[in-house]
Amino acid sequence: MSKVDETVQDLYDEVVARNPGEAEFHQAVREVFDSLGPVVARHPHYADAGIIERLCEPERQIIFRVPWVDDAGRVRINRGFRVEFNSALGPYKGGLRFHPSVYLGVVKFLGFEQIFKNALTGLPIGGGKGGSDFDPKGRSDGEIMRFCQSFMTELYRHLGEHTDVPAGDIGVGGREIGYLFGQYKRITNRYESGVLTGKGLSWGGSQVRTEATGYGVAFFIREMLRARGTDFDGRRVVVSGSGNVALYAIEKVHQLGGRVIACSDSAGYVVDEEGIDLDLLKQIKGVERGRVSDYAALRVGAARFVSSGSIWDVPTEIAIPCATQNELTEADADRLVGNGCAIVAEGANMPATREAIKTFAKSTVAFAPGKAANAGGVATSALEMQQNASRDSWSFEYTETRLADIMRGIHENCLRTADEYGSPGDYALGANIAGFTHVADAMLALGVI
Ligand code: NDP
């Protein structure tokens, strides 16, 4: 092992020892550290100034009780989290996730990723993330509202447009952001639009924010295809998930000429060789809050539902995992490579395991990590903050053009950085190093704080 590799390994061992039992956080740190060797070798001052250790230690971690009353009158208790990871580039920025799997290790992995993703956008935003182990599935509107109000009754004191600005993530969409913003406004007596993003269009939200993560992934893939001298035209695409990111990734892929033939939820996946009928899927998932199995039931003869196995069994040229972390394993990666997949771009955060990423690296598959490919959501959140700060409201077309430009910029930055560090075409390395150096330089300038 070289001296540099030893340094990076020692730093990683220390992170694991200081944060026991947080497997997802360890994985996210490992994934970034896998790329840091060449930077530490070229710029030892980052390691000498303790930048890497400081990056791995959140500036602040908040854990709180969230009591609420269900429709039957029973008192329920959940746990709320906000990890304010790094504010060297701007106020903490990152979503809230409501899902029973949420614990400190998940919030920290998401917050850690967010630092580099936000740096890559080139916009003035730091990294943070939050959420709760609350399960919104099957809950009434009234229950969701009471939960959100209780959650915000504690969280509000830590937020502010110059301090910490949450948004949505799994289980937190426009409805939840509305209830959270309403409670913030009530407690503080301030119409502080810039304190949350993902708001409704009539009360401070931005055009394209709802679509931004999914659209952004499709724009990023368009750049990857362009770099190979080709485009989406007629290509088979598989998108996992059927939530916010997945729906709008499907929409933009279709608009750009690709054909999405499969999508999923946690109960299974659906294959429709004619191409997913997005209006039908939106109605089922977005309006009725139903399942993808309902889609197959309504498209008899055209679509089939598969409740076992993996969506990555479906042969495809382009794979876009948009569901959740570690949904794409080494075995899935082997199958994708075997079936001739050319591009994998992460719409979700850390959907590919470390082993899957290694498999892609050994093959001809171009792999785009989430911190680059799904940065369109947070970038458009930053555009929402800009509009709130100037009390302005931009058109859909203008905002979408800004998003497409940002995604093009991130793509270029990843490739340029990968070239500079001797690994042409390695998007993961390019994203990690470009994000790291941007935030590290700001941390150096701000002193030991
Ligand atoms: P949604 O809640 O809107 O959708 C999540 C989708 O993933 C649903 O189809 C859900 O299925 C599926 N899913 C969730 N957990 C599992 C699981 N354990 N196994 C299989 N499927 C699962 O969330 P988003 O679309 O907002 O987020 C999806 C991913 O994208 C997350 O990783 C998130 O962190 C990331 N992301 C989101 C951004 C945003 O702007 N929303 C920005 C950047 C990244 P089911 O309904 O059955 O649970």
Image (cartoon, grey):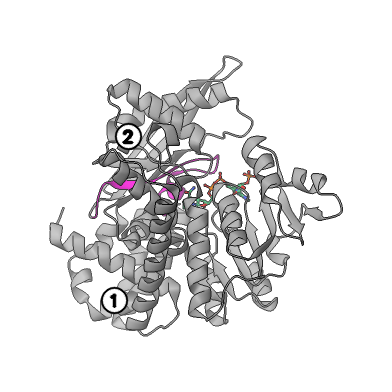
Q: Is mark 2 within 8 Å of ligand 1?
A: no
Q: Secondary structure at mark 1?
A: helix
Front one among 154 and 415: 415
Residues shaded magenta? 89-109
Relative image position of residue 19 (x, y in whole percent): 38, 53
For label 2, the residue is 193
Q: Residue at x 26, y 54 (%)?
A: 124
Closer to viewer: mark 1 or mark 2: 2
Q: Residue at x 23, y 41 (%)?
A: 162
Q: Is residue 204 above or below residue 215?
A: above
1 or 2: tag closer to the N-terminus: 1
For label 1, the residue is 39
**What type is the residue that disc 2 sits on?**
Ser
Relative image position of residue 382 (x, y in whole percent): 34, 49
The quadrant holding residue 204 is top left
How much space separates mark 1 and mark 2, taking CA atoms? 39 Å
Relative image position of residue 123 (x, y in whole percent): 29, 56
Q: Secondary structure at mark 2?
A: helix
Outermost residue toward the right?
301
Horizontal arrangement in the rendering, residue 346 relative to residue 302 (left or right): left
Horizontal arrangement in the rendering, residue 251 relative to residue 304 (left or right): left
**What type is the residue that disc 1 sits on?**
Val
Front one among 208 and 239: 208
Relative image position of residue 107 (x, y in whole percent): 43, 47
Front one among 237 and 8: 237
